Image (tube, grey):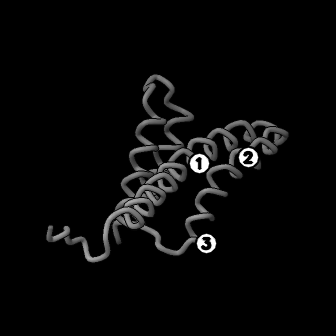
Amino acid sequence: MSSDRIIVLVALVAAILAVFVSAFEYWALVLLVLGLAYGFMHAETDLVRQMAFVVAAIGLPVVANQLDVIPAVGGYLNSIIDMFAIAIAGTAVANWVMDMKARIMPAGGGGSSM
């Protein structure tokens, strides 16, 4: 199993655990770090895919709010998706940082010869 699948699986498990294990108060930080790790390890150069991460990070919690109307499980599904969106937001931030780095740093990574 490749590292990108492992990080996504761990983030999904952490999002589920965050809903049911409320004694640990740093779930959001864990999910953010997982998202950042995924984003830095798999830097996306396609601007459409970068935008898809941003839209998913913003849109998933909005759509998930509609799941509250489902009896018994809707609130849990909403919370799980909300927590997973934190990892997606971390990926979006990492992609943005890598894009800014590529725009600021000179091509080839070499310094000036002055």
**Tag 1 residue:** 85
Vertical relation: 34 (above or below) 50: above
Vertical order, 85 against 51 (above or below): above
Estimate how packed mark 1 is, as few (under 14), some (14 to 19) or many (20 or more) residues with alpha carbons within 10 Å: many
The answer to whether residue 70 is left or right of residue 16 is right
> Looking at this rendering, what residue extends furthest in the left direction?
113
Going by the numbered disc 1, the residue's amino acid type is: Ala
Q: Secondary structure at mark 3?
A: helix
Q: Residue at x 31, y 70 (%)?
A: 106
Give percent across and percent down for residue 9.
45, 57
- Residue 48, numbered label: 3
Q: Which mark is residue 64?
A: 2
Q: Is residue 98 above or below residue 14?
A: below
How far apart in space, not on screen, are marks 1 and 3 (Cα)? 18 Å
> Under tag 1, what secondary structure?
helix
> Residue at 54% across / 49% down in the picture?
89
What SS does tag 2 mark?
helix
Quarter that holds the C terminus: bottom left
Quarter-of-image position of residue 75: top right
Q: Amino acid at mark 2?
A: Ala
